């Protein structure tokens, strides 16, 4: 059984208090995947937001001409699958692969939606964290793009 105290190092839940983490812990599922296993593939059904408890996960996209492009390598405390969940997508646009034996917590899409109605303050804090991380990612991509253009 997952406890709220197990979640204190999860970035997605960093703004939550102990009681709020306890509430989230009740709806999380724990998943284990062996090194090399696919957590999800491109076009597979979305299942929610994943929080990395142990190990590393590669998020990648395959281009139209068959090249794999690694978008991120996420380690303990990080999360993924949030954009598909927020956007209401039914399938993933990327794939997630276990780089090690991994343990994940999963907040199912249905439970995420339920939070909107039952715990709007909790969902607000989670969404604020997602927005901060997305903003940081956009800034990082902009810097990489500018460096690439300058070096071209």
Image (spheres, rainbow, N blue to C red):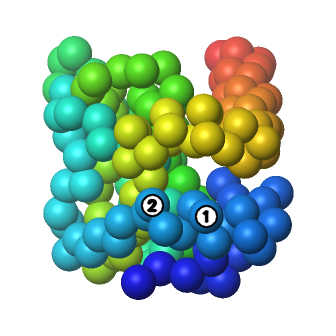
Q: Is residue 9 visible?
A: no
Report the side of 141 relative to 56 (left or right). Answer: right
Above or below for 30 versus 45: below
Report the side of 10 relative to 104 (left or right). Answer: right
Within the image, what quadrant is residue 91 found in? top left
- Residue at 30% across, 42% down: 47
Please rate how many residues cluster around mark 1, counting C-alpha atoms within 10 Å: few if below 14, some from 14 to 19, many from 20: some
Within the image, what quadrant is residue 138 found in? top right
Tally of marks: 2
Residue position marked by numbered label 1 in the rendering: 23
Of residues 44 and 60, the one drawn nearer to the viewer in this rendering: 44
The reply to whether dot 2 and dot 1 touch (C-beta < 8 Å) is yes
Of residues 1 and 74, the one drawn nearer to the viewer in this rendering: 1
Please rate how many residues cluster around mark 2, counting C-alpha atoms within 10 Å: few if below 14, some from 14 to 19, many from 20: some
Q: Is residue 103 visible?
A: yes
Please state the horizontal and vertical placement of residue 110, each as a whole percent of the image.
Answer: 39, 39
Please state the horizontal and vertical placement of residue 51, each as a whole percent of the image.
Answer: 50, 61
Report the side of 48 relative to 149 (left or right). Answer: left
Residue position marked by numbered label 2 in the rendering: 27
Considering every residue shown, the one lying at the far front of the view is: 118
**Alpha-carbon distance for marks 2 and 1?**
7 Å
Please state the horizontal and vertical placement of residue 117, each as a whole percent of the image.
Answer: 60, 33
The circle on residue 142 is none
- Residue at 25% across, 55% down: 39
Considering the image in quadrants, where does the C terminus appear? top right
- Residue at 30% across, 30% down: 92
């Amino acid at each position: 059984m997952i406890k709220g105290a197990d979640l204190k190092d999860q970035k997605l839940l960093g703004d939550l208090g102990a009681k709020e983490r306890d509430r989230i812990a009740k709806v999380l599922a724990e998943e284990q995947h062996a090194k090399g296993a696919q957590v999800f593939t491109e076009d597979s059904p979305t299942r929610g937001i994943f929080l990395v408890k142990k190990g590393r996960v590669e998020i990648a996209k395959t281009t139209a001409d068959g090249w794999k492009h690694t978008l991120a390598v996420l380690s303990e405390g990080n999360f993924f699958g949030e954009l598909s969940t927020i956007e209401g997508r039914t399938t993933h646009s990327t794939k997630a692969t276990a780089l090690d034996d991994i343990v994940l917590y999963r907040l199912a899409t249905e439970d995420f939606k339920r939070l909107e109605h039952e715990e709007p303050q909790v969902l607000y804090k989670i969404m604020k964290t997602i927005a901060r991380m997305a903003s940081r990612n956009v800034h990082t991509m902009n810097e990489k793009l500018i460096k690439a253009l300058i070096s071209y």
